[in-house]
Amino acid sequence: MAFRSTKTFGHELGLSACFRQWKAESHCRLLHGYALSIHIEFEADELDARNWVVDFGSMKSLKGMLEDSFDHKLIVAEDDPMLDELLHLQSLGLAEVVILPATGCERFAEMIFGATECWLDSNGYSPRCRVASVEVREHGANSAIYYAQHVAPVVANITLDTADIVEHLKSAEFAQTIAALSNESKDV
């Protein structure tokens, strides 16, 4: 891949979603909400006739899908044991409920990744242009990223290979470094 471009639907867009992680043992099991931010990274080996990876002006339907799914919605996992009660909020006119296979930024990023791939295909961008990653942010401190299977994260211009990382984590040198750091923290 030679080119990447990004599109961010920021917190200011107001994709205000309410959800819960019903399996959590923390306060995340309770209904809570965020103005989500969505950052999509596209990639292409070649640019189009206009010298673009993707035309940002053509993304109205993608933005509409995000709004339909997340803007002032109560998002409920299909296996939530309180599904009927949460759906009742919709029948009372208190919420617009969207049922998804799972909730949380990791699953939202995965879902948006798939929807964006479909959007690229239906708008004639595929196969030249692909989705490299989708990041969903709850706020400045918390986010989750879903990467394409063929894309490794790039940090400081170094491509990280999963096999190399696993080998490093298994190495004696890494174990010694962790032990030394642990001993230093005890001395502080």
Image (tube, rainbow, N blue to C red):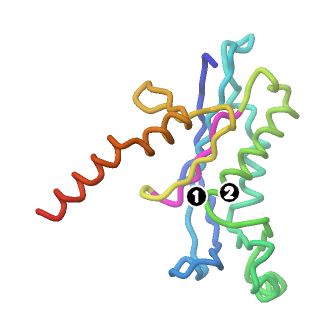
- Which residue type carries mark 1? Leu
Q: What residue appears at the point 80 percent right and 26 percent down from the top-left corner?
A: 125
Q: Is residue 11 above or below residue 104?
A: above
Magenta-drawn stretch contains 122: no
Numbered circle sitting on residue 108:
2
The answer to whether marks 2 and 1 mark residues whose Cβ atoms lie closer than 8 Å is yes
Residue 152 position, x and y percent, is 58, 33
Quarter of the figure with residue 85? bottom right
From which residue to which does the magenta span run? 131-139
Magenta-drawn stretch contains 132: yes
Q: Using the image as rendered, state which of residue 147 and residue 48 is in the foreground.
A: 147
Magenta region, mostly helix, strand or loop? Answer: strand
- Which residue type carries mark 2? Phe
Q: Is residue 106 above or below residue 61?
A: below
- The quadrant of the picture occupied by the C terminus is bottom left
Say what secondary structure mark 2 lies in. Answer: helix
Numbered circle sitting on residue 36:
1
Residue 185 position, x and y percent, is 19, 60
Q: Using the image as rendered, state which of residue 77 and residue 13 is in the foreground.
A: 77
Q: CA distance from mark 2 to mark 1?
A: 10 Å
**First of labels 2, 1 by sequence position:** 1
